[in-house]
Structure formats: structure tokens, C-alpha cells
Amino acid sequence: MAGVYTLKVLTEFASAHTPRDFPGACARMLGHNWKVEVEVVVRALDAVGMGVDFKVIKTAARAIGDRLDHRYLNELEPFTEINPTAENIAAYFYRELVQTLNNARVRVSSVTLWETDRACVRYAEESV
């Protein structure tokens, strides 16, 4: 049986959003210091004995976070069309990372978006 390596990096960004059609106080604009955990799986190591350099994963995640950092998410694509909920933000990160990181050896397995230190959402697609 072949082994599987799971690599994880953590990055963060700060932004504000207004969840549309939300009943309650969180229907008003609010800001978060989001934490983003990215997990990738690797089934084979390279010639150096690595799955993928952590720096590669971190750079890709930070690039997405930089586009959202200190911004009002409701004004940015795709959140002008889809509600900027934690669930949709996690899925957005996942799909963007798949385009950057996936190759013959490396696959993004999940993205966990922490809204607070005690509340998060994990997004993954079954075809990983």
C-alpha cells in the first residue's frame, strides 16, 4: 500500500463582509481576521524527498488572501454574485488553489477557513 503525505500551511487575511439575507445582528457589516488552513496531499516525493515545498503552498494561499485583504468582500468578484459567507469564501480559496497547485503529484485536499478562534468551515471536493 502506498503512503499519502498531507501537508498543511496556515495563512491569514483581514476583511469585512455583509452576509446577505442573514437574520440577526450579523446581517450588518462585520470584519474578521480570517485564518486559512490549506491541506494538500502528495502520493509521491520528488528527487529531494519532498512532496512540495511549504513555501509554494503558502505563496499560493497568500496571493489569494492578498486579493481579499483589507477589502469589503461584497464588492469583489465572485462575492458580488454569491453571498460572502465563510462557506463560500472557503470554496473560493479551494478552487483558486486547485488551479495553481494541482499537478500530477500534488492535489489540494481541503481548505479550512477560521472566522474566529472557535468557528471554522472546512471545504473539500470528493474527487480529490
Image: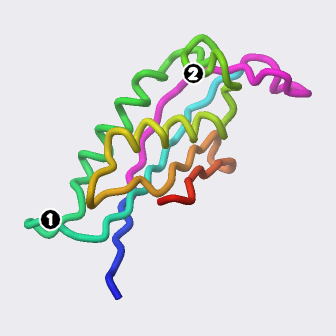
Q: Which residue appears farthest toward the right when viewing the image?
A: 23
* Disc number placed over residue 24 in the picture, else none: none
Q: Between marks 2 and 1, how big is the CA–CA gap?
A: 35 Å
Is residue 99 within the magenta segment? Answer: no
Most extreme residue toward the top is: 75
Q: Which residue is mark 1?
A: 46
Q: Where is residue 62? Give x, y as percent.
A: 36, 34
Q: Is residue 126 left or right of residue 103?
A: right
At horizontal 49% and vertical 38% (from top left) the residue drawn is 93
Q: Residue at x 69, y 48 (%)?
A: 119
Q: Which residue is mark 2?
A: 78
Depth check: give the residue in front, 86 or 11.
86
Location of the N terminus by quadrant is bottom left
Depth check: give the residue in front, 127 or 97. 127
Q: Mark 2 or mark 1: which comes first in sequence?
A: 1
Residue extent of the magenta highlight: 8-29
Classify mark 2: residues with Cα within 10 Å, few (<14), some (14-19) or many (20+).
some
The percent position of residue 8, horizontal first and vertical second, equals 39, 57
* Residue 119 appears left or right of 50: right
Is residue 123 found left or right of 40 in the rendered image? right
Q: Amino acid at mark 2?
A: Pro
> Across the whole image, how many numbered discs are drawn on residues?
2
**Residue at the image point whose x is 73% and y is 17% from the top:** 29
Q: Amino acid at mark 1?
A: Asp
SS at badge 2: loop
